[in-house]
Amino acid sequence: MKTITKLSAILLAAAVSAACPAMAQTDTTPPATNAPAAPKPAKVASRFNGVVASVDSTNMCLTLKATNRTPETKVKVTSATKIKKDGQPAEFSDAAEGLRVSGSGKKGEDGVWTATTLNILTKAAAPKHPAAAAPDAPAK
């Protein structure tokens, strides 16, 4: 039994001493590359939506009605804003009280949005559940 233990200890010592020089020569620094750093993911623009409460044509600003979930929202439109009405190119003058709008942009510290896109919707949205929109069957 002592012979097996001694032999195991000797073999273990030989294996460790053989591995140490190989580990000492291993280069742990990553290779230098000339590749540029990975680009940061693009920041996703924030979204707004609501029903137009008022239109200020002079300042190109829309006020969206408050809801039970959101306060009144002001949206500033610039010459760089891409405006569409029902999916077609449009102008700021196409926005009117009572129309639903949505878009993306940046919300300023003052709470006013600066729109990069503005979608004006005049058509009613299709129901999400067709069965819910179907009339009730007559009672028998």
Image (cartoon, grey):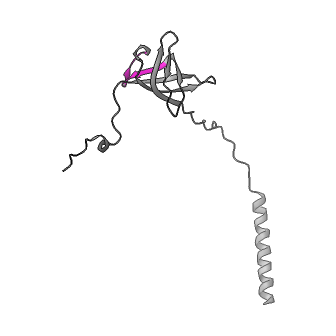
Q: Is residue 4 left or right of residue 60?
A: right
- Which residue lies at the image location 33% right of the left edge and 27% below the top edge? 123
Q: Residue at x 43, y 20 (%)?
A: 83
* Residue at horizontal 80 percent and vertical 79 percent from the top: 9
Q: Give yes or no for residue 39 being in the magenta stretch.
A: no
Looking at the image, which residue sits at the far front? 140
For the residue pair 1 and 41, the one nearer the viewer reads as 41
**Magenta stretch prevailing secondary structure:** strand
The x and y percentages for residue 106 are 57, 26
| 134 or 42: nearer the viewer | 134
Residue 119 in the image: state x and y as whole percent. Answer: 43, 25
Give percent across and percent down for residue 131: 29, 44
Q: Where is 8 relative to 136, above or below? A: below
Q: Dividing the image into 4 quarters, which one contains the N terminus?
A: bottom right
In this picture, is 14 found above or below 132? below
Number of numbered callouts drawn: 0
Residues drawn in magenta: 81-91
In the image, residue 123 sits, relative to residue 134, either above or below, namely above
Which percent across, then down, holds residue 62? 49, 19
